[in-house]
Amino acid sequence: MRADTPLDFGDPADLERLRGDFRAWLAEHPLPERLPGEPLPVFLHRWHRLLHSGGWVGLDVPERYGGRGLTPLHQVAVSDELGVRGAPGVPRIGYLAHALLEFASEDQRRRLLPRMLAGDDVWCQGFSEPGAGSDLAGMSTYAERHDHGHDHGHGHRDSAYYTVRGQKLWTSYAQYSAYCLLLARTDRTAPPHASITAFVLPLDRPGVTVRPLRAANGDDEFCELFLDDVRLTESERIGGEGDGWALAMTTVSYERNALDTGHLSKYGLLVERLRRTARERRGQLPDGLLSEIGRCFVDYEVLVAHARRRTAERLAGQVAGPESSIDKLLMTRAEQRLYETALKVFPEELHGPGGEVFAEYLYSRAASVYGGTSQIQRNIIAKRVLRLTDGGG
Ligand SMILES: Cc1cc2nc3c(=O)[nH]c(=O)nc-3n(C[C@H](O)[C@H](O)[C@H](O)COP(=O)(O)OP(=O)(O)OC[C@H]3O[C@@H](n4cnc5c(N)ncnc54)[C@H](O)[C@@H]3O)c2cc1C
């Protein structure tokens, strides 16, 4: 059994055709070279735009919003074809797109989604704060509502506007983004879960300061976002006041799910590399390490089986929910064990320049934190999947 071949989802004929078309397109549009000194997000953005130019982004988004109106399985197939080639996946914007699809007004969806899918506007996610990560509902950024709106002329008048004060933290790639999907409290008296509202925040708006932070792996992925009386119009609110918590749960449920099979295929490539190396160095690797490789293989197989099941559920119309926490835990375990094992098999990666396994190993440590920590995923599974509290059946 090999782990570096495309995943078999029992593809129907039209999907085989799509895979064939995509392979032909990839042959004509190879992954561009990363320029010397080019920041990774800038390089990935070029790749995003190239993929979009071929029609390979947002396959499962309706055509009227800039997608192709196909199924999640079509997007999975594209991710998978990229993954088995070791190419960067389709841009991870699906979870933000889903938040807009489910909560934004028709006008917002038509305005924002096509540009997001095309990479014309890069988006970031402004949820976490210095005092509100796991306890997201405890956020203190506040959007104060003013009911005397701005007159734009031509008979168009916003009925209200908000001024936003507060700070966000860990906002990935805000320095490269045009828009932020922002959560802020709009009611100081209602319970936390009923008082959070979502906005689309243009990051060039007066009062916004973006300050990048340097992480242990040398990347400046994270940013602090300071919001100093930033004015947002009512038409920049996504959903109603108080809908922000539901939007946040939708967003993270899609963020945590296992359908990003480009990831899985990348793991598959590494599992296969480990298997090949262990066979070549037969008798040289300690048994303990061989059994770790075996466990990596099992983790990978479990993930693939799980991804197939999730795909089938999504095709049957099921939306992502708290069960995505299971996906997140399985992915975290697989990824962390895989790169830990790989570093033991390829210790030279620790020292050599461009040690890709080492860079991936460092980033894998964050998997148990981003998108909600592993402890929080287990709490969600206990409370919202198994309903072990509140007398739920
Ligand atoms: C690579 C990366 C990218 C990120 N990108 C973004 C982004 O783009 N936008 C964004 O908004 N956020 C982002 N985050 C932030 C991320 O969502 C938070 O770091 C995460 O939710 C944890 O919050 P915290 O850092 O405040 O830790 P804390 O909530 O302070 O947690 C500290 C520790 O306490 C544990 N803990 C806390 N509460 C409980 C509990 N009730 N039960 C058991 N244990 C508990 C946690 O598991 C953790 O181990 C990113 C994080 C990382 C690592």
Image (cartoon, rainbow, N blue to C red):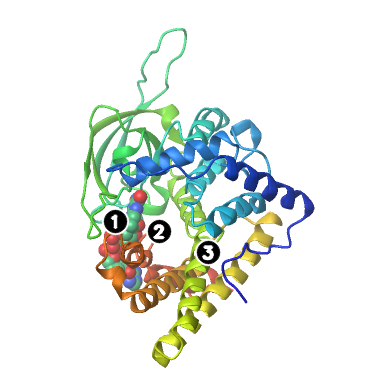
When the figure is inspected, residue 36 is found, relative to residue 317, above or below; the finding is: above
Could you tell which of marks 1 and 2 lies nearer the N-terminus? 1
Under circle 3, the secondary element is: helix
When the figure is inspected, residue 233 is found, relative to residue 306, above or below; the finding is: above
Q: Is 3 in front, or is 154?
A: 3
> Where is the C terminus found, in terms of image quarters?
bottom right
Q: CA distance from mark 1 to mark 3?
A: 30 Å
Mark 2 C-beta closer than 8 Å to ligand 1:
yes
Residue 50 percent across, percent down from the top left: 51, 37
The answer to which quarter of the image holds residue 54 is top right
> Where is the N terminus found, in terms of image quarters?
bottom right
Q: Is residue 347 visible?
A: yes
Q: Amino acid at mark 3?
A: Leu
Could you tell which of marks 1 and 3 lies nearer the N-terminus? 1
Q: Is 294 in front, or is 128?
A: 294
Return the residue at label 2.
371
Q: Is 286 in front, or is 307?
A: 286
Residue 298 percent across, percent down from the top left: 54, 79
Q: CA distance from mark 1 to mark 2?
A: 13 Å
